[in-house]
Amino acid sequence: MSQQAGITAIGSYLPAAKITNADLEKTVQTTDSWITRRTGINERRRAGAGENCSDMAAAACSKALEKAGLDPREVDLIICTSLSPDKICPSTASLIQGKLGLINSAAFDLSAACAGFPFALATGAAFINSNIYKNILVVGAEAISRLIDWTDRNTCILFGDGAGAAVLQPVEAPYGILANYLANDGTKSGLIQVPAGGSAMPASFQTVEQNEHFLKMQGKEVFRFAVRVIPLAINNVLAKADVGLEEVALFIPHQANIRIIEAAAKKLGVPMDKFFTNLEYLGNTSTASVPLALEAATQENRLNKGDLVVIIGFGGGLSWGANVIRWGAG
């Protein structure tokens, strides 16, 4: 039978510390009911002292490798996507490789903010489908709490930390990644950004004093963008896969805000029970949200072998993307 790239195992990692809405009531002008009503989020995780993005990513990768029964020496490539990497250089993927002893792998980071995981899946699938590599780790990981101004109500109520990893390998048709759709609009890149810390605005006394190293987001504009591009991404990727909307068993969107997901589902005419969400307990974990939700969906028996699943990411860039997968993992 013909083969194509598919997810054969998923692993995840969540830090132990939780920040509840009640906790945030003590630090910013907000209430539990306001946060829940506006976002659907009740709590989120926060990385512990000394617990970095690469540590969480390595833990998720280790679990995925164990589930796949894959020897670390057999991994050909690591693709890491993160909005909150340990450092500008070296890549977080390189740090993961060193932590796990993946001595035979290439490693690089892919930057597409909250849309990173669909972009990384499409990239990994291309390597497999072109017979360049056979065993690829794709990991989305965030220690985004380190980039949050905890006095800024617009952002601190939303984000959480964690990591999710997938093993990509050749699988027999009809299983695997059937189609990918990726897009970007750089003219609106200022809507989500961390202004300082790069070569355009290096760290200085002024950038620190003015909080320019924290994540900035224009929430209303991002909301409108997300509601528009989720249906766009879904319709485009389904057309590429020659699959009808009604054939999809489950949609797994980036877990940004329940109101975004509800509005997009309404535009598509798809009932909300076909959209998997777990943001109530994890918040917006940026590029980690899709793999974390994928694993949670399998654990809750919402996603089973043979199901068609569409995953959707959207975020800074502005970037958005989607993948259609015939689920074949156990």
Image (cartoon, helix red, strand yellow):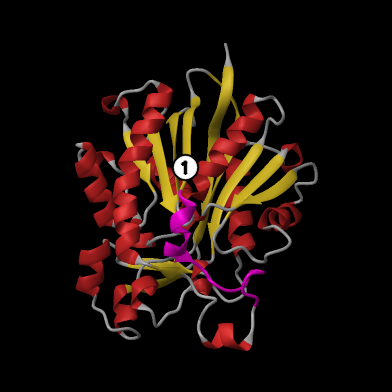
Q: In the rendered image, is residue 272 in sight?
A: no
Q: Residue furthest top?
A: 1
Closer to us: 37 or 73: 37
Asked whether 179 falls inside the magenta stretch, the response is no
Q: Position of residue 79 (x, y in %)?
A: 64, 46
Q: Which residue is under mark 1?
A: 183
Q: Position of residue 229 (x, y in %)?
A: 35, 45
Question: Horizontal placement of 254 versus 215: left or right?
Answer: left
Q: Is residue 107 above or below residue 330?
A: below
Kindly indicate the quadrant of the structure image that contains residue 251. Answer: top left
Residue at image location 64% in from the left, 55% down from the top: 58
Which quadrant is home to the N terminus?
A: top right
Q: Position of residue 231 (x, y in %)?
A: 31, 40
Q: In the rendered image, is residue 244 in sight?
A: yes
Asked whether 198 falls inside the magenta stretch, the response is yes
Question: Horizontal placement of 308 versus 271: left or right?
Answer: right
Question: Horizontal placement of 294 versus 244: left or right?
Answer: right
Residue at image location 28% in from the left, 53% down from the top: 260
Kindly indicate the quadrant of the structure image that contains residue 321. Answer: top left
User: What span is in magenta?
Assistant: 185-202
Report crowding for label 1: few under 14, some 14 to 19, many 20 or more residues within 10 A (C-alpha).
some
SS at badge 1: strand
Q: Is residue 49 above or below residue 265?
A: below
Q: Residue furthest front?
A: 187
Residue at image location 58% in from the left, 60% down from the top: 56
Question: Horizontal placement of 312 versus 76: left or right?
Answer: left
Amino acid on which the number 1 mark rests in the picture: Ala
Closer to us: 313 or 69: 313
